[in-house]
Amino acid sequence: MWSKSRAARSPLPSLLATLLVLTSCTHPPPPQSDSPQQSIWSGEAKPMVLSDPDDRSVEVGTEFTSGSDGVITAVRFHQGPEDVGATEATIWSSYGTKLATAPLPPGGSGWREVQLVSPVAVEADRSYVVSYRASRGHYSSDPDTFAGGRSVKNGWLTAVDGVFTDGDGFPEQSTDGRNYYVDVVFRPTGPSLRNVDGGDKFYDTFKSSFSTSPDFFPLGVWAAQANSPDQIDSDRALGLNTYVLALEGSDLRLIKDSGMFALPDVPSPDSAGQLLTDEADMWAGAGDAPWTGALGAGSDLGTRPCIPADAECGYTVMLELRKKVADDVLTYANYGKGVTFWMTREQAARFVNEFQDVVSADNYWFTDPNICQAKEGGVIRHNGANDLSPPDCRIAANYGRTTRHVRALVQPLAAMPVWNFIELGHPFTEDESGTITPEQLRAAVWSSIVNGARGIIYFAHNFGGPCVSYNLLRDPCGDGIRGQLTSVNEQIERLAPVLNAPFVDGYARSDGPVDLAVKRHDDSNYVLVGATQNEPFEATFTLSCGDANSAEVIDENRTVPIVNQSFRDAFADGNAVHLYKIKNTGSCGPA
């Protein structure tokens, strides 16, 4: 959610995972089947705090997602013995639109369930909120259930956070992980196909833009110069296909004739589109004040190029730059910590939706010296209540969180492609800020893609550390990363038809700490999985249909057995990524 926390609370200690070897399990997992109806918590779940001493009127609820399309037929919640003012239950969209309400008649303490007059249809890959109004307070709760970005999974449902608002209305504030035990009764409706964001022919709507061939997936490098065949050939050999902010002196015609693409910040008939600007959310702020015309990237935030200098003019900047580009030319913009951390949902959404056709944000989770602070990365994982611990902060899964964060701002949902940035070296001047490793690079890229990124941009500058470089891909500073970069880009290019294919929601789910996406291509389902915790673990994956008896683990020279529509695999650490191919699934779910 988007608001600052109501109160800071200490997270519960993380449970220690058992050390596992990185091999697939040979013993079959227990049989599993989908229940006709599912909820997040069982009827035996009992809150630690049965009746909170807070006696004010408050709307309390749960933010949740579903891995499958389906319908909500009822709302359930745990009512404390002193909670005598429960009046109404509500299902909300992530933007605060009421989807259904139900009056709550008086009732006793414990778990209560109220049927909805009409079932509410929900979609996979969306966030929802279920809440009830405790008009006299004394709601049930647990501290720290969701602390550190933890979630609660059951079946297709995932509870993401506990939320509240004083009085009544949309509950979008949250404490540091508090759970209010508000739940739904959900019935999955089976596998369904979902197109990639923007649609598979999105770029065809623009003049001379990117290829919409299934074999093309944008893999760009930021702020590089390309003015000779040797430079272009060298970059292509690394698996790159796009120059984003192609620097002055680049030969855009040569780039185009070579089969590569360019997004310069100036108009050109040889470009695939135009970059508007970078990080205007940070250097100009969320406002409509007049703009001096200066591009202030990297300037001190106290001297913005706005009129007056302490005003905010980011929306003006973006609007004026957009006006200079022809309507049929694709526009792209990148944003920073304003959109991802510092702004309200409404402020950030305006940047994301009103100015460009393709959008990204850059959060360098492995190397940024400040990103673990409460006011930065802590906003996404701790709601701004406290700093992130190193295990919660320095993990590849946070690149997927950034991707999801930006995608959730797009309106209508999934209307445009969202790309994501990955650093290749040491992008900050502080020596202690760290340098990304090859293993972290691969995991960050796949975390972004699993969470919906339709393009990857690499930041190839070293501004600190032992080897300062303006383009580490072309000098010895990049010797340690080029091999992994080439490998991951080759894998993405080879799997591009899969990545550009529709998602299959409601086919595979997991009980483990993983991010997961499923793609359908050529009568096979591809289950793409990345770890979301640094400790080793095993995870079980449950399939909703089909009779496959094994899954190929792509590029790992092994298979895992599927027994009773379920398989199990090991994840060594937070950089673990496994890509599974399950063949002959055309009869399973939608065609």
Image: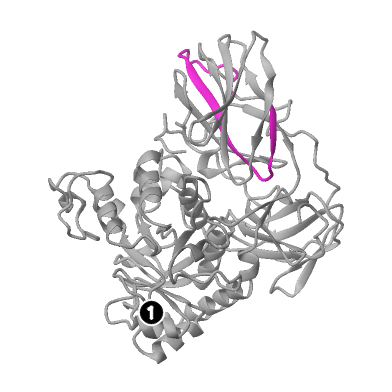
Mark 1 is surrounded, within 10 Å at the Cα level, by few (under 14), some (14 to 19) or many (20 or more) other residues, namely many
Q: Say which quarter of the image contains residue 537.
A: bottom right
Against 1, is 251 above or below? below
Query: Quick check: 40 left or right of 143?
Result: right
Question: Measuring 71% from the left and 53% from the top, which residue is drawn there?
Answer: 539
Q: Where residue 207 sits in the image (x, y, percent)?
A: 43, 68
For the residue labelled by badge 1, is the local secondary structure a helix, a strand or a loop?
A: helix
Q: Is residue 375 visible?
A: no
The stretch drawn in magenta includes residue 497: no
Q: Where residue 96 sits in the image (x, y, percent)?
A: 49, 31
**Three-letter amino acid code at disc 1?**
Leu
Q: Is residue 502 visible?
A: yes
537 or 419, nearer to the observer? 419
The stretch drawn in magenta includes residue 56: yes
Question: Measuring 73% from the left and 26% from the top, which residue is drawn there?
Answer: 44
Query: Quick check: 525 left or right of 137?
Result: right
Against 412, is 234 above or below? below
Q: How is the image coloured?
A: one colour
Reading the image, the residue beneath label 1 is 472
Query: Quick check: 430 left or right of 455?
Result: left
Question: Measuring 47% from the left and 19% from the top, which residue is drawn there?
Answer: 168
Question: Measuring 77% from the left and 72% from the top, which residue is drawn there?
Answer: 558
Q: Where residue 322 sits in the image (x, y, percent)?
A: 30, 57
188 or 560, nearer to the observer? 188
Q: Where's the C terminus, which quadrant?
A: bottom right
Q: Where residue 187 sits in the image (x, y, percent)?
A: 74, 35
Against 444, is 220 above or below? below
123 or 368, nearer to the observer? 123
**Highlighted range, magenta:** 49-73
